[in-house]
Amino acid sequence: MTVQQRQCDVLIIGSGGAALCAALRVAVGGLSVLVLEKSAWLGGTTAMSGGATWVPANHHARAAGLADSAQQALDYLRAAAPDGWQSTEDELWQAMTQQAASMLAFIEQHSALRFALTGESDPLWPLAGAVQQGRMLAPLPLHPRRRWRLRPTPLPRLFTYHELLSSDLWHQPVRTYLRHLPQLLRRQWRGELTKGAALVAGLLDACQAAGCELITEAAAERLLMSSSHQVSGARYLHQGRTIEVTARCGVVIASGGFEWDQQRRSQHFPGPYDFIASPRENSGDGQRMAEAAGAQLAHMDQAAISGGIPARHNQPWSGLSIFFHYEPNAILVNRHGQRFTNEFVFNMGAELDARDDQGQPRHLPVWLISDVHLLRRAPLLNYYRWRSPGWIRQAATLAQLEQQLALPDGALQASVARFNQGCARGLDVDFSRHLSAAHGKADRRLQGGLAPICHAPFIAIPFNRTFLATKGGPRTDACGNVLHRDGQPLAGLYCAGAAMANPIGSKAVGAGTTLGPNLTWGYICGTSLLARHQALTQEPTLCTA
C-alpha cells in the first residue's frame, strides 16, 4: 500500500466550534493548519446547535454595565460541581474562566461574527457566583463569504436564538412565523445564517482567510508516534488514499463525542435510550486514537442528555433534542410508576441518567404522563405524533395506560392522583415545582405552573435519554495537552470540545455551557500550540492558558 506523505504545523481533527476556534487561533499566529473533517459536511454538532454560548466576564456584559469576573465564574463552577470534582478539575476551571472572555474577543476581532447578550440568568441562581444576566450570548445573523457545505439540522435556521427565546414557536408555530415573516424572508433572500450555522460559517470564513486548509471526507485512523510520549502527526484516509501528515507543532483532537459507538455507549450508559441527536460521525474516533496512543480517558459516563422526539427516517441523526416537558399538566414517572424529580429542574439529563450503587439506571425507563390538553396546547407535538405512529401511547383511563406501559398495578394512578391533589392547592408537595420557573423568565418558550391531569384520553410519551453529545475522552491539563496514563503529558497532542474529558460534565451550569467552554478549550489549545511553536524554534515559553 502506497502511503502519501505531507506536512503542516498543526493538524486539527474535526470541524466543529472547538476545532475551528483552535485552527483560527494558530493560523492567525502564522502557523500552517490542516483541518480534517470525517464527513462531507462541515461544522459537526455545533452547526446543528442553537448557538447558545456561555462566556463569563465577556466584553458585551462589561459594555452593558453588568458586573462579572473570572473569579466569580470560578466560584459558580465550584459551587455547581459534583462532589469530588474540584480536586481534579479546578485547574481546568481556572484556565477556562480566565480565557473565555479573551476567546470571545478574539473571535470577534478576527472574523465577521458578532454576538449579543440574551436576557438569561445563570439557571442555578442560588449558588455562589451566579449572575442574573451577562454570561449568555448567541451569534447574530451572518452572511457568509461563501456557501459552505454545513452540517444540516432539523431545526429552522432562519430564527435567531434571541428570537426563539422571545417567541413561542413550540405552542404557536403559525403565529410565530407570521409575526417574524418579513425578517425571515429578508434573511432567506440575503442568504443569512443564524444560531450554530452562523457561528460555524463565520469561523470557516475566518479560517480560510487566515490560510487554513480544510479537507472533508477525510477519516483520521491513528496517531503517529515518534516516541512513547510524543505525537508527531496522524494517518487518514481520503478518496481511497492513505495519507500520513507530520504535524511539526502538534495535533488537536476535536472530533466530537462517542455516542454513536454502540459498544462504548452501552458500556458507559447502560439501559434504554430513545434517540441520538448528533451526527452519526460522532463515533468516538478521537477517543480511540488517543487511547491507543496511551492517553488517560476520564468522564466517560458524562454526557449532554435531554428528552427528545423522533426524527424523519433516513436522517443522519435518530432524534431531535426538544424540551417538551415544561408543561403544567405533565409529570415524569419512572419504571415503578412514581414521580422522581421536579420536571422543571435545569439538569434534567443528570436526573434521567441517575445510577444506583452498581452503576445501573435508577429510574429508566421513564415516561412523560399527560392528557389530551397537552396535545391541544402543543400542536407541534401532534405533528410529530402523526409523523411517527406508535411513539405516543394513549388510553381512555389511567388504569389502561398503566397496563400498556407494564407499570405496577395502581402506581401510576396513585402518582397522578397525588399530583392532582397538589394542583388543587397550587402546590407540588413532593418536589416544590410550584417554586420553579423552568429556564427563567427570559425564555418564553417554556411553560410553568401546575394543572391537573384529568382529561381523557391520557397519554404517555417515552422520556428516556436522548444524547446530544458525550463528554468523556482524553484527560488534559490546563493547557489542553493530553495526559498519558502515567500522568505525564503526551507531547504534541491536544484535545478540545466534546472529545475531551469535559471538566464540567453532565451537570451544565447554563444553556450554553457546552458550546462556550468548547470554544474556549479550542482557543486554549491554539494558544498552547503557539507557545509550543515558540519553544521549538526559539527560547522555551511557559503555557499562557
Image: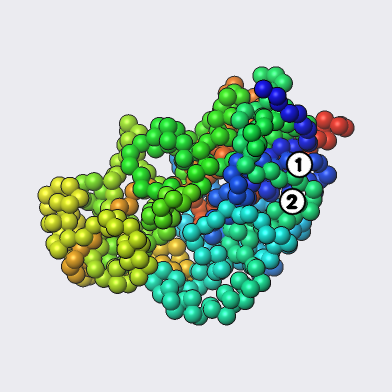
Does the residue at mark 1 contact the one at mark 2 (Cβ under 8 Å)? yes
For label 1, the SS is strand
In primary-sequence order, the first of circles 1 and 2 is: 1
Left/right placement of residue 36 relative to residue 79 reads right
Q: Which quadrant of the figure contains the C terminus? A: top right
The residue drawn where x is 63% and y is 61% is 198
Residue 179 position in % (x across, y down): 50, 80
Look at mark 2 in the image and give the residue it sits on. Answer: 207
Q: Which amino acid does label 2 sit on?
A: Cys
For the residue carrying disc 1, how many other residues have a C-alpha within 10 Å: few (<14), some (14-19), or many (20+)?
many
Q: Quadrant of residue 235?
A: top right
Q: In which quarter of the image is residue 291?
A: top right
For label 2, the SS is helix
Inspect this view and state whether residue 357 appears.
yes
Q: Which amino acid does label 1 sit on?
A: Val
Residue 464 position in % (x across, y down): 34, 48
Q: Which quadrant of the figure contains the N terminus? A: top right
The residue drawn where x is 13% and y is 62% is 397
Residue 441 position in % (x across, y down): 46, 70
Measured in 3D between alpha carbons, the distance from the residue under mark 1 to the one under mark 2, in whole angstroms, is: 9 Å
Look at mark 1 in the image and give the residue it sits on. Answer: 33
Question: Is 144 located above or below residue 527 in the figure?
Answer: below
Question: Is 513 located above or below residue 482 in the figure?
Answer: below
Residue 147 position in % (x across, y down): 68, 59
Left/right placement of residue 500 relative to residue 172 reads right
- The colour style of the image is rainbow
The residue drawn where x is 63% and y is 54% is 149
